[in-house]
């Protein structure tokens, strides 16, 4: 793997983790956001300097991600991106004061195991096979149902969250829904990176406008902004972001392999490692708790008098 691709992936991890933590910190000081009022959501976000700083960090991570996709195959890139979950967990604990459960910590360890399995499968010539474009029909056949599934899942999670007497959600359904949107976005970023050519800017712009990539980025960017920030305000970053990242990673590797035609390893052992790493990531996602434990209610009545206490 080219060293600059690995360096760009690690830089993207730092920028994305920092951006999410800054945004989560900013969201704690904002009024409650609602997906039913997307314009008001955007207005409140843009009014927060701390949130803007976090969004700039995410934008810089996006630029680093473009460099990664030009130099590494999808599976390698996603394997490296998943390693950023460890940094996110550390930052959410130190900066946000979030506490993770034992099952969640075990899940992070398992995700790192999945990362090792994927990287171990990236030896040989097929590890350096970097596809540039995907057939538009194939890409849209994958993207449109995935976007619809993500939006329906998010809507379902919203309906369940409004029911009275439900345990507070840990954010897993929200993370899965947003992860599907960002998975489509990741495929679009991969496509954009393959069309970039710094020596012929007018031709690049023409090719981009004739491709589905910028339009998918527009849809996923607008919807992802409102949905992800609303979910991040309600749930712990240490749950939302790992689930979202895992879904995005698995979706991009599986669907990107089909859409862009990047081959799986020919060697049976390395193919098993690649598929095994993906299976471990999916198993972790299914095993994560769906709800936070209920917060014990404090007594609200007047204190007992000494005579009543006796």
Image (cartoon, grey):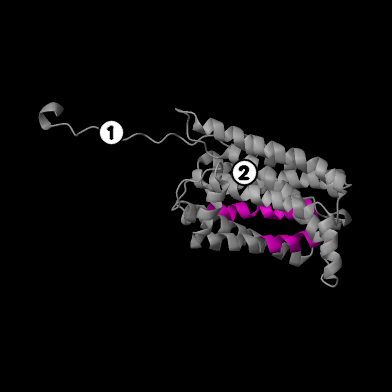
Q: Is-magenta flag for residue 264?
A: no
* Label total for image: 2
Q: Is residue 158 above or below residue 130?
A: above
Q: Is residue 298 left or right of residue 42?
A: left
Q: Which range is magenta?
A: 62-90
Most distant residue in the left direction:
307
Which residue sits at x=53%, y=54%? 43
Secondary structure, magenta segment, majority class: helix
Task: Name the residue beneath numbered marker 1.
Answer: 299
Badge 2 marks a residue whose secondary structure is helix
| Quadrant assignment, res 61 | bottom right
Q: Between residues 199 and 259, which one lies in front from this camera angle?
A: 199
226 vs 37, nearest the viewer:
37
Q: Which secondary structure, mark 1?
A: loop
Note whether residue 130 is visible: no
In the picture shown, does residue 307 fall above or below 247?
above
Q: Is residue 215 left or right of residue 43?
A: right
Give the CA separation, mark 1 to mark 2.
35 Å
Quarter the C terminus occupies: top left
How far from the left and from the top, in percent, is residue 4?
75, 67
Position of residue 271 measured from the top left corner of the image (x, y, whole percent): 83, 44
From the top left corner, tell me how far across and down residue 12 is, in percent.
66, 61
- Residue 243, numbered circle: 2
- The question of residue 82 being in magenta is answered with yes
**Quick one: quadrant of the N terminus?**
bottom right
Asked if residue 93 can be seen in this view, the reply is: yes
Q: Is residue 6 left or right of residue 34?
A: right
Q: Residues within 10 Å of mark 1 (few under 14, many from 20)?
A: few
Q: Is residue 47 above or below residue 118?
A: below
Q: Earlier in the sequence, mark 1 or mark 2?
A: 2
Which residue is at 52% across, 43% downward? Answer: 34
């Amino acid at each position: 793997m080219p060293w600059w691709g690995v360096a760009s992936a690690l830089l993207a991890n730092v920028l994305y983790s920092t951006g999410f933590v800054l945004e989560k910190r900013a969201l704690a000081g904002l009024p409650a956001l609602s997906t039913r009022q997307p314009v008001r959501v955007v207005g409140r976000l843009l009014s927060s300097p701390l949130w803007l700083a976090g969004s700039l960090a995410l934008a810089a991570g996006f630029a680093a991600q473009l460099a990664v996709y030009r130099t590494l195959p999808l599976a390698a890139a996603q394997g490296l991106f998943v390693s950023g979950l460890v940094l996110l967990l550390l930052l959410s604990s130190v900066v946000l004061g979030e506490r993770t459960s034992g099952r969640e910590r075990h899940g992070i360890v398992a995700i790192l195991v999945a990362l090792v399995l994927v990287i171990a499968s990236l030896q040989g010539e097929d590890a350096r096979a970097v596809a540039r474009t995907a057939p538009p029909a194939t890409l849209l056949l994958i993207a449109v149902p995935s976007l619809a599934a993500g939006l329906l899942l998010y809507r379902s999670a919203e309906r369940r969250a409004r029911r009275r007497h439900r345990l507070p959600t840990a954010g897993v359904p929200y993370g899965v829904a947003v992860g599907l949107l960002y998975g489509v976005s990741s495929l679009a970023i991969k496509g954009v990176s393959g069309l970039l050519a710094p020596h012929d800017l007018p031709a690049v712009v023409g090719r981009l406008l004739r491709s589905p990539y910028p339009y998918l980025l527009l849809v996923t960017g607008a919807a992802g902004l409102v949905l992800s920030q609303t979910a991040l305000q309600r749930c712990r970053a240490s749950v939302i972001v790992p689930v979202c990242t895992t879904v995005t990673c698995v979706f991009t590797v599986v669907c990107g392999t089909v859409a862009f035609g990047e081959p799986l390893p020919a060697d049976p052992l390395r193919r098993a490692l690649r598929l095994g790493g993906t299976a471990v990531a999916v198993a972790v996602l299914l095993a994560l708790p769906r709800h936070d434990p209920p917060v014990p209610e404090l007594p609200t009545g007047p204190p007992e008098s000494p005579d009543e206490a006796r």
